[in-house]
Image (cartoon, coloured by chain):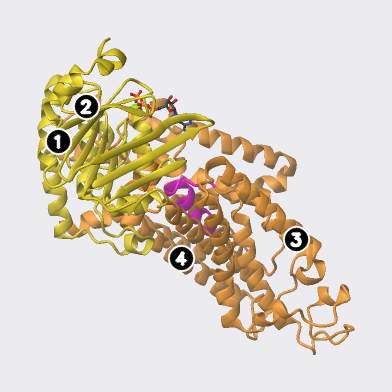
Amino acid sequence: MDAFKSWIARSGTGSILLLALLIVVVFPLTMDIFRLNLVGKYLTYAFVAVGLVMLWGYGGILSLGQGVFFGLGGYMMAMFLKLEASDPEATKIQSTPGIPDFMDWNQLTELPLWWEPFRHLPLALIAVVAVPMVLAFIISFAMFKRRVGGVYFAIITQAVALILTVLIIGQQGYTGGVNGITDLRTLLGWDIRSDSAKYVLYFVNAGLLIGVIALCRWIQMSKLGTLLLAMRDKEDRVRFSGYDVAMFKVFAFVLAAGISAIGGAMFTLQVGFMSPSFVGIVPSIEMVIFAAVGGRMSLVGAVYGALLVNFGKTYFSESAPDLWLFLMAALFIGVVLAFPNGLAGLYESHVKPWFARRKAPKAAPAAVEPPAAPPPSPSQKSAPPAALPGGVQGQSA
Amino acid sequence: MSNTDFVLAIEDLTVSFDGFKAIDALTLYVDRGELRVIIGPNGAGKTTLLDLICGKTKASAGSIKFKNQEMTRLAEHKIVRAGVGRKFQTPSIYENLSVFKNLEVSFPRGRSVLGALGFRCTDEVKERVQSVATEIGLADALDTEAGLLSHGQKQWLEIGMLLMQEPELLMLDEPIAGMSVRERELTADLLQRICKGRSVIVIEHDMDFVKRIAHKVTVMHQGKILAEGSMEKVQADPKVIDVYLGH
Ligand SMILES: Nc1ncnc2c1ncn2[C@@H]1O[C@H](COP(=O)(O)OP(=O)(O)OP(=O)(O)O)[C@@H](O)[C@H]1O
Ligand SMILES: [Mg+2]
C-alpha cells in the first residue's frame, strides 16, 4: 500500500487525475456549450504546450515553430472535412462541381492529386500525425546530426514557420490561401456544428489530452526521460557514454510535433476551420508562452498555462485589443525572469510546503507554531518569501 | 598498417587547428592491462590527444587503432560502444540527478531511443550500481543529488559512470585535480584496482601521484612525444628536465 502510494506521488498521477476531474467533470457541469467549446479550443493549444514541456523543458530544445505542426495537423483534418463538404450536389453552382470552393475560385478544374488521399478518413487521420512527424524528423535529423542547437535551432524553426505561412498563403488554389480552409460541416455525415457534436468533440479532446499527458509522463519516468534531462545538463557526457545524442533530440522533436498535430486536428474539428494564422511565428511564440507560464517542467502546468493565458487573452483582447500584445510580452518576460518554473514552480515552492506546514501542527496540537517550520523534504529549496502570492503570504509566517 | 597485440596503436597522428599542429605526427602504443601516464607542460596537447582517441576532435592525418579497429572515422558513441571510456578534465556528471541515476544511466543497455524507452532497472542493474558505488566509495550517497557532492566525490562519480560501461580502455584527464591529500591516496588505490583487466591512460601533473601509479610514463611536448619509459628513466632524461620537470 505504501509502495503504491509512493508510486502515485512519484508518477504525478494525483495531479493528472485532478486535471482530468477539472476538464472532464467540473467544466462541462458549470459551463454552457459556447464557453465549453471555447475551453475546448484552448485545450487544443494545451497539446502544443505539453509537447513543449517534453521538448523544451525536458530536452532543453527551444522550438519557436510549433505552430507549423499544430497547423499541419489542423490542415490535414480540414482537407478531409472540406472534401466531404464539397460533394457535387452541394457545389453544383461552381464551374467545376465537386472540388472545394476556393479551388473553383482559383480556376482549378480538377482536384490536385495530393488531395486525393484526403477523401478517406483513415488516411486523413494517419496524415494528421504522420505528415507533421515526418517533416519534424527531416528538419531535426538534418539539424541535430550537424550539431546545430540552441538559438540557431530556434531560428531555423522560425524560418520553417515563416516559409510554411508564405507557402500556404501563396498557393491559394491548393490551400485556401490567407482565409484558410473554412465552411467545414460534417464528419462522415455527422454535423460537427451542432451542440451535441460540440459536446462529444470536447470530451474526445479532453480524453486525448489526458492520454497524451499520461504517455508523456510515462516517457519522463523511463530511462529516456532521464537521458533527456541528462543531455540538457551535460550533452557531451551523454554522448561519451555511448548514446547517439542527436537521435534522442530527434525523438523529442518528433514527439512534440505529433502531439501538437493532434491538437491542431482537434482545433479544426471543434472550431470548424483552419487558417495560416495558426502556423506562423506569432502563434508559435504564444504557444511557448503557455508552456512558460504553466511551468516548462510540468505537463499539467502547461495545460493550466494554456487555459489561463487564453482566458486572459479573450478577456483583454475584447476590452483592450492593442494592449494585449504588450501585456503578453510583459507576462513572458516576467515569468522567465521571476518564476522560471512557472505556475507549477510556484506551486512546488510555496503551496505544497504551506499544505505540509498546515498538516504538521496536527501531530502536536498543543504546540505553538514553530517560528521556522522545517521544510517537508530535503529536496525542496526554500524560495524568497518576497515572491509569495498575497493569499499564501498571510499564512506563511 | 598491420595488426598488433596492442590495445591501442596510434601512428603518425596529426591534427592542426588553423595551421597550428596541436598533435604532430605522434606515435604511441598502449599494452593490454597497462596503466600509462601522460605528462607534459600546459598546452602540450595531452587533452587534445584524448579528444582525438574518443572522436571528439577529428584527426587531420594518421591512424588510431583500438583492438586493431580503425577509430578515426567512427562516430563518438560508436567508439564508446567499442569499449573506450573517457573522463573529462572538469568533472562532468549530471548535477540534477541522484548518484544512483547517474550510474544507472551509464549502464550499457538501452542505448537506442527505443531501447531507452523499454529499459527496466532490473536487479542486475541495481547490483552493478551498488558494486560500482562501493568501489568509488559512494555506496552511502546513492540517493544524494550529484550536484551536492564534494569536488573529489564528483571526480569519483564520473570514474564510476565509466566503470558501469566496463570499458577496455579507460582514459582519465587529470582525475585528482582539486583533491585533498587523503582523496589523492584513495584515488591512487582506486586506479590500481580498476586497471586490472583493462588498460588505463591517465593524464596528470602531480609527480608523486604519477610515481605511485604509473607502469610507464609518456612525456609530451608541443604535440610530440619527448620521452617514454619508466618513471626513473624519464625523470633522468635531460630533455624532460629542461622542458617540464626543471621548474
Ligand atoms: N579546438 C581547438 N582549436 C584551436 N586550438 C586548440 C583547440 N583545442 C586545443 N587547442 C590548442 O592546442 C594546444 C594543446 O591543448 P591541450 O588542451 O591539448 O593541452 P594540455 O596538454 O591538455 O594542457 P593542460 O595541461 O593545460 O590541460 C593548446 O595550445 C590549445 O590552445
Ligand atoms: Mg588538458
Q: Chain of mark 4?
A: A
Do tags 1 and 2 sit on the same chain? Answer: yes
Q: Secondary structure at mark 3?
A: helix
Mark 4 — residue? A24
Q: Are marks 3 and 2 in contact (CB under 8 Å)?
A: no
Q: Is residue A261 above or below residue A200?
A: above
Q: Quadrant of the N terminus of chain A?
A: bottom left
State how far apart marks 4 and 3 are (Cα). Answer: 38 Å
Residue A309 relative to residue B182: left or right: right
Q: Inspect the image, locate mark 3, and give the three-letter code of the amino acid beneath it.
A: Leu
- Amino acid marked by disc 2: Ile
Marks 1 and 2 in Cβ contact (< 8 Å): no
* Real-space CA distance between mark 1 and mark 2, rounded to the nearest whole angstrom: 11 Å
As displayed, is residue B55 above or below residue A397? below
Residue B217 is situated, as x and y percent measured from the top left of the image, at: 21, 29
Kindly give the residue lying farthest to the top in the view shown: B247
Name the amino acid, label 1.
Answer: Leu
Label 2 sits on a secondary structure element that is loop
Helix, strand, or loop for circle 4?
helix
Residues in magenta? A47-62
Which residue sits at x=41%, y=40%?
A: A345
Question: Marks 4 and 2, Cα distance to the nearest angstrom?
Answer: 58 Å
Q: Position of residue B138 (x, y in %)?
A: 14, 38
Depth-wise, is mark 4 or mark 3 nearer the camera? 3
Chain A appears in which tint? orange
Ligand 1 location (quadrant): top left
Name the residue that disc number 3 marks: A167
Q: Can you identify the residue that label 2 sits on?
A: B176
Could you tell which of marks 4 and 3 lies nearer the N-terminus? 4
Q: Which chain does the numbered disc 1 sit on?
A: B
